[in-house]
Image (cartoon, rainbow, N blue to C red):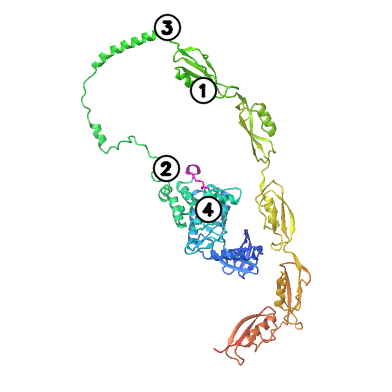
Amino acid sequence: MQAEQLLNNRYRVDGLLGNGGMALVYVGTDTLLRRRVAIKVLRDQYAADDDFVRRFSYEAQSAAKLSHPNIVNVYDFGRENDAYYIVMELVDGATLAELLREERVLPENVAIDYAIQIASGLAYAHRQELLHRDVKPANILITKDDVVKLSDFGIARAVSENSLGATQPGMVMGSVAYISPEQAQNHEIDERSDLYSVGVVLYQMLTGALPFTADTPVAVALKHVTEPAPQLEPDASGVSPAIAAIVSRLLRKNRHDRFASATELASALREARERPLVAHAASFGEPPAGRIPPGAPPPRPSLSPDRPPLTDGVGELIAEHEEPHRPDRRWIVWIVMPVLLLAAVLIGFFALRSDLFGPARNITLPSVEGQSSTVAQQTLFQLGLRPTVTEEASETVPVDHVIRQDPAAGTKLAKDAPVALVVSEGLPLVTVPNVKGFSAADAQRTLTDAKLRAKITQIYNATIPTGIVIDVNPGAGAQARQGSAIALSVSKGIAPVSVPSVINLTLEDARHALAAAHLSFTVTQTANDAIPADIVASQSPDPGAFAPPNSSVAIVVSTGPTSTEIPNVVGNDPDTAQATLTQAAFVPVLNYNVDAKGPPGKVAFQNPNAGSQAKKGSKVTIFVTVPGTVPDVAGMTLDDAKLALVAAGYKVGNIAYTPDATVAPGTVVRTEPEGSMRLNPGESVNLTVMQTAQ
């Protein structure tokens, strides 16, 4: 579409807004209602495919049924020459996908608000017996006032009264990252399938990631079918328990375990926003009865768990109760005290005698060298000895094993005698050498000489050459055990860049996109009947592949349709000439040549000339000879008069009927302007016709 082009004499194209796989989207103006609109135009290469045209038409019919604040309104559908277009509401804002690329994670209250609006729009569509089937951030528009609007019902399908949308066999619709398990398996789906996709979108808004990722779309689809969705742990993610429960319920494999409708989901989201803990416990039944919801403070333990609390007034009664009188027993102390003093003297005497003669040394100390520290200490404790432990580095004795003991094995010891154990704390400590800035090979050799090992992790770095050590952990000068691993971060050089898709872009737009990705390009041109001139038809490497920065991307640019010979239509009548040119893949343009002497109603000449080469789809102007005066059609039938006027290069204007004439009913009485009057070709001639009998 060209700027200022007018569709259906009403919709003016103002500029390109965006492009998708099937269609281009332009911003335009409805000149009748004086409002800005979006115009979605089916790509030329698909306009010739009946299946694509039917799908495009169905999108307009499906979306036109829906009039809701959270759904993009569709105003019109039409065709201009070979271009099919949909006129829809122009949303001033961005897609949710663009918003997530910028912010990654949305605040919980914003995510809830967006999810409520998405659910409201889906609830209305479901009430109209229409499923969306492709709920994803790219199809969710956010206005500058934070109003959410669902778009792209292009793969929606009408639903029957008994079942919401059984899919045709073999047809899996929707984007694989957001597809429901039943949709991925070609099973029957219903409105709860859309709710699963809402759950994926809500998960992504809250975490900045998708619940399921893999290297291929097939692997992602299999995960949707077979793997349980990751749980949002409130403590780890910061998501409230109620919202975590909602996401968990939306992402359940069995659709019967999800919310029953979008309306129920919207209500649950509102409840979760207002009362997160109550909503979590009451609405969803999670956690089970008797358990404390995550994040809720535990109940305080009772000081008397086995006894009911005292009732009011009991405490005062106990405090006021007087203790009964007890007899004085102080006389007992005067009798017991002498006995205790005598016992103390006897104990001291025998203890002193034991020290004088020495303790009995009847415990033979066994050898515990080489044993683990725990086993050795247990052995000595069981013998009645008192082990003490100190640590020492050793290159021969394993860590936490006894190197030596004191006294030596075989020594006779008394009970409770001390035994000193020296336990290995492992290999000796060595100083980590400074290998930062070394090559990876030199760093490994240096660490090996220091009796250390290297554990290499490669990372991208834009400033340090490939293979050079960027960082060392533990750092240089630190102490580490012999044989321990030292982490080396080694540069992989500049990180590769993701190759952007430039297919279907103009050569100039492709140049800007590749330059922004720090890539250059080479151009090869080729003719293509389906792709307009100066549009990129293919690229290598493919979109999404990784390539070194400043490397070259090979792009193939279309030169437009192939050239073919223009047929000769001079001397033909206009209809025949136009049909001949159309069949030869040219666009005929009718013009008139005023020549009173030439053969009226015949092509006098054409531009370009017959036999010359031109691209398919280009315009060929034919000049039809006309006299330049209004033909006299009075007395002719209405049909004959119309043919005569068209043959003379005029349009049939207004037709009026009169009973006041002498001519036969149904015949022309007069024209305006009258016959033989000069009039420029292409203008309208009004007819007055004799009224037929009633």
Quick one: label 1 or label 2, which is nearer the N terminus? 2
Range covered by the magenta-colored residues? 227-238
Q: Is residue 20 left or right of residue 617?
A: left
> CA gap, disc 4 to disc 1?
57 Å
Q: CA distance from mark 3 to mark 2?
A: 69 Å
Q: Position of residue 634 (x, y in %)?
A: 65, 88
Q: Residues within 10 Å of mark 1 (few under 14, many from 20)?
A: many
In what element is the residue under mark 4? helix
C-alpha distance separating marks 3 and 1: 34 Å
The reply to whether discs 4 and 1 touch (Cβ–Cβ < 8 Å) is no
Please report contact status of discs 1 and 2: CB closer than 8 Å, yes or no: no
Find residue 181 and name its label: 4
Local secondary structure at mark 1: helix
Report how far apart the C-alphas of labels 1 and 2 lie in the structure. Answer: 45 Å
Q: Which amino acid, mark 4?
A: Pro
Distance between the alpha carbons at the discs numbered 4 and 2: 34 Å
> Do we see residue 625 in this rendering?
yes
Instruction: Give the camera-side residue of 412 and 197.
Output: 412
Q: Residue beneath label 3, please? A: 357
Q: Residue at x 38, y 40 (%)?
A: 299
Residue type, mark 3 in image: Phe
Relative image position of residue 103 (x, y in whole percent): 56, 49
